[in-house]
């Protein structure tokens, strides 16, 4: 998409008018064009000679053929070598097929960078456009957006649906409901003198209400703009360096929110990393908890209550990995100097400084690396005063201790566990669900459990279990083809050979070769 559309023009005009002194705001953000194989989708399409990973039972169905009609799986049958000339087909050559991965907690319109500069607006816009492509390249075919810039989000979704941008299916809440001053307690003006003007064009990712009428009006607006769930934030303390207590909802406000949710048949998801937030959330008909309690060991009764009320958890354990920085301390506290944490730090720093970050902008990545120095200068306690906003690594280190212990106890109690990354916030890059999955492996989850969390469980959590989450007849043909069996090696999910959304190839087209032999039509191989 090399030219600027009207929406981009309006946004950039606003930014340029406010920041005319910055010459970098020239032109329009572009994304690389994609070439797709000339597959005839007018009739059925078959994926032949494939091994289907049955995530329901944790087994492989060998040598199968999947027949797709329109956007759904019509049939699954044993593979026959002869080519059906009436069907277009892709011979998978014995590769493994899993259902499209689901990212159950991300922020599509955030650019994963901790350092905001008004002069870099074009970089941010470009990265936002790349986020969806990065997800699809990594095998993610559906995301649940947990709070975005609503106007920008709807622009993105429109571009995905028209095909002008590559992106996943999106389930969203629009802005999330928050009392004035609640998490995340960063105002647009804290980031830039032009922040308020920019937000007037992009929309705000959270609405900070000041009274009940304002709360109800904004909840209503969210629904009118297509939200399918409500997101709350329950903690009473800031996650950010140099900040402390933050306001919380009144009991009456929470009652009003849940009455509204019940009236409109909307699930409610709650951000909570503190025990205070989880304990309070358990008093209400919550659908899912986002993140994991990281400041205390939960009581057995807390976990039993969660299981009894069928409250799911999307633990985003990668928070403990991505946001734990030894630079926070002159010397690592003894409690954090464990072999497990040392190994996580080694993996994390290797990824940051030497790893493959997909299509993430190298310039923004360098800014993130520079942000790490803030923990030394000015230091965590002074960062907020200097308007430098990053999560306190101490909480992340505790995530690796208390959070993982709490997750294992939830697992033992039968709590439904999903899989998400918080992509979009600093250091959490889109298209990295595989990193959360591999971390789940390192803390003791079996590969079949991990795949189930990232597909079947996530589908149930986001309310789409009848459409996605497994390779089954009647479900949408969101498919990921892998070279290896992920039940044996979860790292197989790192590099998909092919990704299909609704039965159409969306990434991995270079792996598809057309059979040009005489008399052969509509036959492709991997």
Image (cartoon, rainbow, N blue to C red):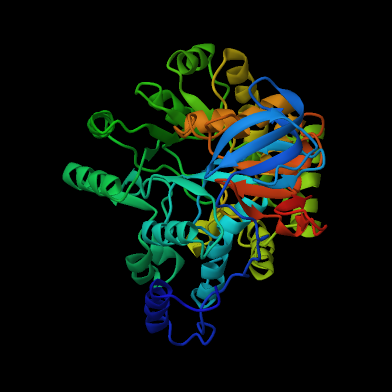
Question: Dividing the picture into quarters, in which one does residue 120 lie?
Answer: bottom right
Does any portion of residue 428 appear in the rendered image?
no
Q: Position of residue 44 (x, y in %)?
A: 59, 44
Which residue is pictured at 61% across the width and 46% down the height?
A: 140
Which residue is pictured at 70% across the width and 32% down the height?
A: 440
Q: Position of residue 367 (x, y in %)?
A: 64, 67
Between residue 356 and residue 317, name the one nearer to us. 356
Asked if 318 appears above or below 359 in the picture, the reply is above
Asked if 457 appears above or below 128 in the picture, the reply is above
Which residue is pictured at 55% across the width and 69% down the height?
A: 126
Which residue is pictured at 67% across the width and 58% down the height?
A: 372
Does any portion of residue 131 appear in the rendered image?
yes
Q: Residue furthest left?
A: 213
Q: Position of residue 218 (x, y in %)?
A: 25, 48
Q: Is 265 situated left or right of 188 in this image? A: left
Question: Dividing the picture into quarters, in which one does residue 1 lie?
Answer: bottom right
How many tags in the picture?
0
Between residue 232 and residue 458, name the one nearer to us. 458
Between residue 305 and residue 130, name the one nearer to us. 130
Q: Residue furthest front?
A: 519
Q: Is 269 situated left or right of 340 in this image? A: left
Q: Position of residue 67 (x, y in %)?
A: 63, 37
Asked if 367 appears above or below 65 in the picture, the reply is below
Q: Is 253 situated left or right of 286 in this image? A: left
Question: Dividing the picture into quarters, in which one does residue 127 lie?
Answer: bottom right
């Amino acid at each position: 998409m090399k030219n600027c559309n009207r929406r981009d023009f309006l946004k950039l005009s606003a930014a340029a008018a406010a920041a005319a002194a910055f010459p970098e705001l020239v032109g329009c953000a572009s994304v690389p064009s994609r070439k797709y194989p000339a597959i005839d989708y007018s009739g059925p399409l078959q994926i032949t000679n494939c091994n289907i990973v049955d995530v329901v039972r944790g087994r492989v169905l060998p040598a199968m053929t999947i027949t797709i009609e329109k956007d759904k799986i019509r049939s699954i049958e044993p593979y026959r070598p002869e080519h059906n000339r009436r069907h277009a087909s892709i011979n998978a050559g014995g590769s493994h097929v899993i259902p499209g991965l689901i990212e159950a907690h991300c922020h599509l319109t955030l650019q994963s960078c901790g350092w905001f500069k008004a002069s870099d607006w074009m970089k941010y816009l470009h990265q936002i456009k790349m986020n969806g492509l990065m997800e699809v390249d990594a095998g993610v075919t559906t995301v649940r957006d947990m709070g975005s810039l609503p106007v920008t989000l709807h622009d993105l979704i429109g571009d995905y649906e028209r095909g002008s941008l590559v992106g996943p299916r999106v389930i969203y809440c629009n802005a999330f409901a928050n009392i004035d001053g609640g998490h995340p307690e960063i105002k647009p003006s804290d980031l830039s003198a032009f922040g308020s003007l920019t937000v007037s064009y992009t929309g705000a990712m959270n609405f900070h209400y000041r009274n009940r009428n304002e709360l109800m009006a904004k909840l209503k607006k969210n629904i009118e703009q297509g939200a399918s769930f409500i997101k709350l934030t329950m903690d009473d303390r800031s996650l950010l360096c140099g900040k402390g207590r933050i306001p919380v909802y009144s009991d009456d406000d929470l009652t009003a929110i849940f009455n509204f949710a019940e009236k409109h048949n909307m699930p409610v998801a709650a951000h909570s990393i503190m025990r205070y937030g989880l304990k309070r959330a358990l008093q209400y008909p919550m659908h899912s908890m986002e993140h994991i309690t990281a400041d205390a060991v939960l009581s057995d009764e807390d976990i039993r209550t969660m299981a009894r009320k069928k409250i799911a958890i999307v633990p985003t354990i990668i928070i403990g990995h991505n946001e734990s920085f030894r630079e926070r301390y002159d010397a690592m506290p003894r409690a954090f100097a464990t072999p497990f944490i040392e190994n996580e730090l080694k993996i994390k720093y290797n990824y940051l400084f030497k790893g493959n970050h997909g299509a993430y902008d190298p310039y923004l990545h360098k800014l993130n690396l520079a942000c790490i120095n803030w923990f030394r200068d000015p230091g965590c306690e002074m960062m907020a005063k200097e308007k430098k906003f990053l999560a306190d690594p101490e909480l992340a280190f505790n995530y690796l201790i208390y959070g993982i212990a709490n997750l294992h106890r939830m697992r033992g109690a039968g709590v439904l566990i999903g899989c998400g990354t918080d992509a979009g916030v600093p250091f959490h890059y889109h298209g990295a669900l595989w990193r959360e999955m591999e971390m789940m492996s390192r803390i003791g989850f079996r590969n079949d459990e991990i795949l189930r969390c990232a597909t079947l469980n996530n589908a149930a959590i986001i309310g789409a279990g009848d459409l996605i989450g497994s390779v089954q007849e009647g479900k949408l043909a969101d498919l990921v083809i892998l070279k290896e069996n992920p039940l044996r090696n979860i790292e197989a999910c790192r590099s998909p050979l092919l990704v299909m959304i609704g039965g159409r190839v969306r990434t991995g087209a270079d792996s598809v070769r057309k059979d040009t032999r005489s008399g052969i039509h509509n036959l492709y191989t991997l």
